[in-house]
Image: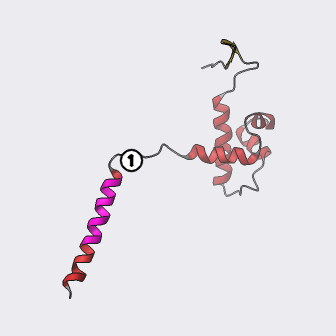
Amino acid sequence: MKTMTTVSVAGQERKAPGRPRNARTDEAILHAVLDLLSEGQSVAAISIEAVAARAGVGKATIYRRWPNKEALIIDAIAAMKGPLPSRSGSRSATTWSCSSRRTARARPAASAR
């Protein structure tokens, strides 16, 4: 699964210099951050060195992909998020349910007079 990075220069496609980045390395780094957080380490306590050791990569590999620790942690947390739920009809059903409950609660109070 090799992917080639290409750069478009004046309508021509050419290969970017260097070896293509490995997506598995990105995943290993992000999982390392999440593992450290799940073990109870605070964001302040997590270091790039600890992440690199846990992911089995060098610090330079991390710094090539993320400019600082904060950006790395933000991306790791964002990676946890799944796809957003679909909103097809759920809002109208929720609105109907809430309004019918409100009406049902209001009726006994009105009949108690």
Q: Is residue 56 magenta?
A: no
Apparent side of residue 63 relative to residue 87 in the rendered image (left or right):
right
Magenta range: 91-103
Extreme-bottom residue of the structure: 113
Q: Quadrant of residue 111?
A: bottom left
Name, please, the residue furthest toward the front.
10
83 versus 64 height, above or below: below
Depicted 13 relative to depicted 87: above or below: above
Residue at horizontal 73%, vertical 39%?
Answer: 66
Q: Is residue 100 magenta?
A: yes
Residue 47 vs 94, above or below: the answer is above
Q: In the depicted view, which residue is nearer to us: 86 or 3?
A: 86
Q: Nearer the viewer, residue 64 or 89?
A: 89
* Circle 1: element type: loop
Disc tally is 1
30 or 71, nearer to the observer = 71
Residue 40 in percent (x, y) is at: 67, 58
- Residue 51 located left or right of residue 80: right
Task: Report the residue marked by disc 1.
Answer: 87
